[in-house]
Image (cartoon, rainbow, N blue to C red):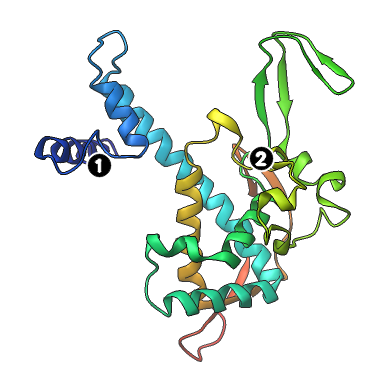
Amino acid sequence: MHNSVMEIIKKREEKVKLGDIDCYGTDFLRLLLKAYHDVDENKRILVQDLIDECKTSYIAGQETINSLLSWTVLLLAIHTDWQDKAREEVIELFGHQNPHPNDLSKLHTISMIIKEALRLYPPTVAFIRRSEREVRLGKFILPANIQLFISNLVVHRDPEIWGDDAHLFKPERFSGGVAKATSNNVAAYFPFGIGPRTCVGFNFATVGAKIILIMILQRYRFTFSPTYIHSPVINFLLVPQHGIQVILHSLKSDEGPS
């Protein structure tokens, strides 16, 4: 991985030297490269720091994709009506061609499905924050310098926010966006955190999960396996303890389930 990261870094630096791009691009790598080349030596980061940050971003994003994709596939295997809707959208937009990243924003149904999967099974189920000063939250007064354990898993399933069906898989709740789904309390939905410390792997994970899900839907119909035992566990991320068991049915042959 070290060599792969260095190759990406060198290619980006070479593009800047040749004038193909300005300011090292517009992504997370740009911020790291700017810090690496900072004119102030006291603010400059070491090349090993640069590489480590890239590795962390990739690994965190990859593991998040695995978690998100597992729960999404399981939910669609159970709720086959939504699986059919998602496949119809995919075929209408892409046919049987590989998806292009520029067209992912057109995926309304799949976006709702992924948002709902993240609501029910967020990759990280809690965040720790520290109060810098005393603050009042409703009837509570929080002293300065205490650690706060904030569980998005609890908030995401709160009936007072989401309604009596908060425990159910209903992607349509996001048809009007997060604001409408939360009755304008957008801070009640934070599968990747919120604010400036939102997980850096957020976009990588959601885009990656969409692309993989599209390619699965183009090739297979999948149904819930009776061997599956529902046992979510926290193993760094929220994952199914025994994996996800679904039955795959090829859409391109008559071979039956695999």
The residue carrying mark 1 is 4
Q: Residue at x 85, y 57 (%)?
A: 165
Question: x and y percent of residue 167 in the render?
Answer: 81, 54
Q: Is residue 87 above or below residue 22?
A: below
Which quadrant of the view contains residue 20?
top left
Identify the residue at the far bottom of this view.
254
Labelled disc at residue 234: 2
Q: How many marks?
A: 2
Can you say which quadrant of the picture contains the N terminus? Answer: top left
User: Residue 211 got which mark?
Assistant: none
Side (left or right) of 22 relative to 212: left
Q: Is residue 242 visible?
A: no
Quarter residue 237 falls in: top right
- In this picture, residue 150 sits left or right of residue 35: right
Residue at image location 73% in from the left, 71% down from the top:
226
Instruction: Residue 244 in the image: state x and y as whole percent.
Output: 62, 60
Picture residue at 25% right of the left edge, 18% below the top = 38
User: What is the CA distance from the residue labelled 2 to the residue labelled 1?
Assistant: 30 Å
Q: Nearer the viewer, mark 2 or mark 1?
A: 1
Mark 1: secondary structure: helix
Establish if 191 lies above or below 46: below
Q: Position of residue 252 (x, y in %)?
A: 46, 86
